Image (cartoon, rainbow, N blue to C red):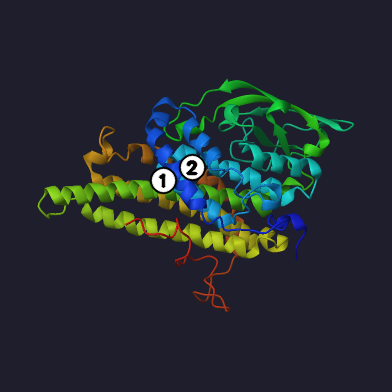
Amino acid sequence: MRAADDLDWRAAGPATRGTDLIARAQAVAAIASKYASDVDQAARFPFEAIAAAREERLLGALVPSTLGGDGCDFGAVVDVCYVLGRACASTGLIYAMHQTKVACILRHHRAVPWHEGVLRRLSREQLLFASSTTEGQNGGNIRSSSAAVEHALARITLERDATVISYGEHADGIVTLARRSTGAANTDQVLCVFLKSDYSLERVLEWDTLGMRGTCSAGFKFKAEGEAVQILAESYEKIHAQTMMPIAHLMWSGTWAGIAAGAVERARLYVRNATRNGEGKLPPGASHLTQAIAKLRVLRSIVSSGIRRFEAIASDAAALESVEFQTYMNLLKVNASEQAVSTVMSAMQATGLSGYRNDTQFSIGRHLRDILSAPIMINNERILSGVALTSLVAGTPALLRDGDGTPRADLHDESPARPAIRTSIA
């Protein structure tokens, strides 16, 4: 049963798979790769890569053609995260976070003219949207908000202690969580869309981290003012279950898979080079390359399977909100993040000192530092604790596949189709 037509974000116009989308993404990735080391070392925003993404019109990929976008399917956009993440982790993650916010607006705007105008402008001007969900001492608990929207007739104001807003100073708009009103419970939340002219940012926390340095995820005092219509009409409880959580986890996982693929590719080149120089004798770490490739296959399978699962029920509100699907998508994030770390570690072991060093063409140090953020982007321990009760009542599958022949939802499968995530790295 569909709760609202907005759940089909392509309903407004014909969808395309954006046959040239991956080619455009690869053009951006070439630029992202060129500047990736400098972005990491200087902890700076990847200006060149995002400018290229605008030039290639990647930022409006999900927006229907009737609103000026490409109308690409969801899985194709996850593939773009993979391609960009393989070149520059920060660029890939910025793109993933942007598209997650775009998806929330697309799927829950209920044909409100103001939001449709934003989507048209996004497509026309290639606007970049940031996300503000982390607040105060809440950490990754985005299902509770302290700051509340204050209403004065048709106007609203919001002041928020946003301890993390990734690339906030470089975005054209911010989509933020808040309590519905000053009298609402912390869990009665809404999602608000503010454009750059609507808000001010006062930096209160810097961003000096081990990895993902180019996301520039500083903390700010966020103050915004706008129209009440800028609040998405759907409650955040539904937005979170139907769109925010599953799409964020898949977009992130696509990026992490790309980072892992980049590391494996460097390891493969190292082993090939060492074998050539050793007159055909494999280097000591060659077996770790085999492990890295095998782990990357599993990681790609996890993400690809998740894409198919989401797309199969993307317009079914009840299925999206089911305990089984919510558990599946949360555990997908845990599994993908841990598998990505393990894959990069195996790649590092395959390269030995050449990968450990920062001054060789086979260096994997940046990949390892970046991928270590994956298990703590909404800490895996928090997620596992949250699904612990449902795990007690969930049944164990009796068969490998469901009765209709499709793979079991809680197991992985791998089959060919998607041009990036499911394509061999060789």
- The amino acid marked with disc number 1 is Arg
Res. 180 in view? no
Q: Which residue is mark 1?
A: 86
Instruction: State the SS at label 2.
Output: helix
In the picture of the structure, the residue carrying the numbered disc 2 is 92
**Observer-nearest residue: 409 or 405?**
405
Pointer 1 and pointer 2: residues touching (CB < 8 Å)?
Answer: yes
For the N terminus, the image quarter is bottom right
- Which residue type carries mark 2? Gly
Residue 142 position, x and y percent, is 64, 41
Residue 81 as seen in the image, left or right of residue 284? right
Of pointers 1 and 2, the one earlier in the residue sequence: 1
Q: Residue at x 70, y 63 (%)?
A: 316
The tally of labels here is: 2
Q: Position of residue 5 (x, y in %)?
A: 76, 58
Q: Nearer the viewer, residue 157 or 276?
A: 276
Picture residue at 23% right of the left edge, 46% below the top:
270
Give the quadrant of residue 148. top right
Mark 1 secondary-structure assignment: helix
Residue plotted at (56% across, 31% down): 167
